[in-house]
Amino acid sequence: MNAPATTQNTTVQLDRAEVSATFSIAARRSAQPLPSPALLRQRLPLSATLAERIHADRNAIRDVLDGHDPRLLVVVGPCSLHDPVCALEYAQRLAELAPQVEDQLLLVMRTYVEKPRTTVGWKGLLYDPQLDGSGDMAEGLRLSRRLMLDILDTGLPIASELLQPLATGYFDDLLGWAAIGARTSESQIHREMVSGLELPVGFKNGTDGGLGIACDAMRSAAHPHRHFGIDDLGHPALLETAGNSDTHLVLRGGHAGPNHDAASVAAARAALEKQGIAARIMVDCSHANSGKNPLRQPQVLHEVIEQRLAGDSSLRGVMLESHLFDGCQPLGDELRYGVSITDGCLGWSGTEQLLRDAAERLRSQQTPQRLSQLAQSQPTIR
């Protein structure tokens, strides 16, 4: 007689714990409630007009990646966003430049609010918006979505790395393009997540430089999945996805060095074709391709453009880490305005000149066929 009573009493205690505002799970863990993705989207809504533009942005990006539009896709911006004021200043400058180079380059701004860490460190605006270790994630979610909406208002498409699958639902409706990083391309959870996204996604090669992980990821994400997740209300749910064929490879180098040179790109193209994957390649001009020296990014981009001009049509895009000023700085009490607090970046003056030069070099060696493609290229209606 006592056992059922004990079981029933335990069930009641668990039910009460589930609805507690803040409760202790165990000696080493605690939990605080966060707004659901649906609630945050309701508080910071996406207008119908802006939703239509994001849809058009995604189609334009798809057309470049698919080779229907001969322009070069350029995902450019701060390594991470930490100061909304300087992020908006950067966005305004990039938005002013975009129409001046849009005949050759499709500019998309990096709006990274999550940062992967090898061990520990600042994990991004979403996790610690006050930059002081307080970890006010509720404010980080709100501030991240608000800042992305403000950047979209400048007219730019935006991009981000999707690091924590549970956070994706808070802002994936705003993105024109997304990345899965070198540390997470191997993750089954991330592959399942990508299979349900309605936007183009780039998978980076592994940190060792190998391509197998990214190739497997693209093949997996193209298929439907049933997987554990949360719904828009934040409830545990069985999610069913249709598959996402709009994925591509991002070459970011590896432990052995860069992989953006012509031989490495040819090897990547062959590896993709061998597995029946479309040869859509983006080069990350930072990370191992630049030897982690942000001031070497222009040389990497120069080499990519040389390969395109030599006829390599598989090179569809590049990534650049750029901020208002060169370099990076440690996180501390007094921060220099417009300087990255994560990876080093190329400053705005160098970035602007680099993008202008890239567009001019592409213009100067146009063939009649390319001019015809540019004249006829329009985002595909989907």
Image (cartoon, helix red, strand yellow):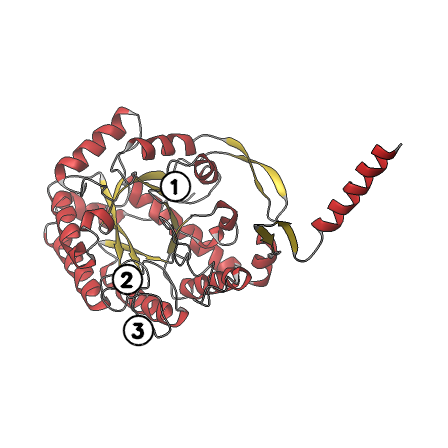
Crowd class of label 3 (few under 14; some 14 to 19; many from 20; radius 10 Å): few
Instruction: Name the image quarter holding residue 315.
Output: top left
- In primary-sequence order, the first of circles 2 and 1 is 2
Q: Which residue carries the number 2 mark?
A: 98
Mark 3–mark 2 Cα distance, whole angstroms, equals 26 Å
Is residue 233 among the parts visible in the rendering? no
Q: Classify 10 Å Cα crowding around label 1: few (below 14), some (14-19), many (20 and above).
A: many
Q: Looking at the image, which is closer to me, 57 or 31?
A: 31
Question: Is residue 310 or residue 290 the one in the foreground?
Answer: 290
Image point (22%, 50%), residue name: 285
The numbered mark at residue 184 is 1
Give the labeled residue for mark 3.
336
Locate residue 38 relative to residue 350 in the image: left or right: right
Looking at the rendered structure, the kind of residue marked 3 is Arg
Residue 335: % across, % down: 33, 72
Q: Position of residue 56 (x, y in %)?
A: 41, 51
Q: Nearer the viewer, mark 2 or mark 1?
A: 1
Q: Determine the secondary structure under disc 3.
A: loop
Question: Residue at coordinates 82% horizontally, 38% vertically from top-left?
Answer: 6
- For marks 3 and 1, the one nearer the N-term is 1
Count of picture labels: 3
In three-dimensional space, the C-alpha distance between marks 2 and 1, rounded to whole angstroms, equals 31 Å
Instruction: Note whether 353 is above or below 74 in the view shown.
Output: below
**Figure quadrant of the N terminus:** top right
Q: Amino acid at mark 2?
A: Ala
